[in-house]
Amino acid sequence: MDISELSSRLSSGRLFHAYIVTGADADTRMRAGKLIAQAAVCQAERGVPCGVCRDCVKAKRDIHPDIEIVRREKENANHTVDAMRALRARAAVLPNEAKRGVHIIDDADFMNMQAQNAMLKVLEEPPEHAVFILLADNPQRLLETVRSRCETVSLNPEQTLLDPKVEAVARELMEAYVRRDNLGLVRAAQPVEKFIKTELFDLMTALRRETLGRSGTLSETDVERFMEAADSGDKLINANIRGGYVAGELIAELIDRETASR
Ligand SMILES: [Zn+2]
């Protein structure tokens, strides 16, 4: 499964109480978990997060009070039964701001039997407002009874997860470019002004992906131009340059100078 599939599953509008996110690498699993969490707190309730409501903004900045990430106390150690009991107690409390409280459990496959049984109790009687997202490299290590209570999201290993909103911007930029539509480029780049650093990096990845996906129809010069624009974008973002300026530079690199000077 890739991001578009995850999006379409989210957009089916059915939110589950518990998910197991597996496949890909740990970073990608965490990003997928955070995307589901954002969808769970988003005020739009459309399944796919709107990206602009107060809850989405806080979720993206990792400062949403109703989204917690439960990590192992020590690396190479299991989640403890006490930690799972504490989680159960926290999950019972009503969320502060959003309609739901989301608990992302990192390395959920690192639980001994006792801890898993404590987790199972939570999953057997989940509080109405709680969503649990278990990130697991090896879900087979989880009890069958735990697994059967979760909706499994298996990520595609070769595909890094990108924000659908960011992917849409990359697509629009490419489409405007192909049409030689300079005004369209400027319009497509507008949301970039408000992008935070991770979204800007994602945009460069999405632009490269968009370019490679169309390499059959684009000229060699066009491919080079996009790849270079993405590379210089990355440099600017690394230097902590803001979205507005990154958007301006992108437009400058992609704009069709012949029609622009007319
Ligand atoms: Zn939202």
Image: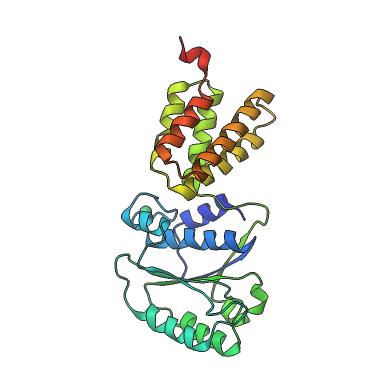
Check the image and report above or below for 7 versus 221: below
**Viewer-side residue, 121 vs 204:** 204
* Residue 75: quarter of image: bottom right
Check the image and report above or below for 231 versus 81: above
* Place of residue 109 in the rendered image (x, y in percent of width and height, measured from the top left): 61, 76
In the picture as drawn, the residue positioned furthest to the bottom comes out as: 114
The answer to whether residue 145 of the structure is visible from this angle is yes
Q: Is residue 213 left or right of residue 47?
A: right
* Place of residue 149 in the rendered image (x, y in percent of width and height, measured from the top left): 54, 76
Q: Which residue corresponds to the image point at 60% horizontal and 82% vertical from the top-left?
A: 77
**Viewer-side residue, 72 vs 30:** 72
* Residue 98: quarter of image: bottom left
Q: Quadrant of the C terminus?
A: top left
**Viewer-side residue, 65 vs 19:** 65
Q: Which residue corresponds to the image point at 66% horizontal and 36% vertical from the top-left?
A: 212
* Place of residue 139 in the rendered image (x, y in percent of width and height, measured from the top left): 64, 73
Q: Quadrant of the N terminus?
A: bottom right
* Place of residue 56 in the rendered image (x, y in percent of width and height, measured from the top left): 38, 55
In the picture as drawn, the residue positioned furthest to the front comes out as: 239
* Render colour scheme: rainbow
Q: Which residue corresponds to the image point at 46% horizontal and 36% vertical from the top-left?
A: 246
The answer to whether residue 45 of the structure is visible from this angle is no
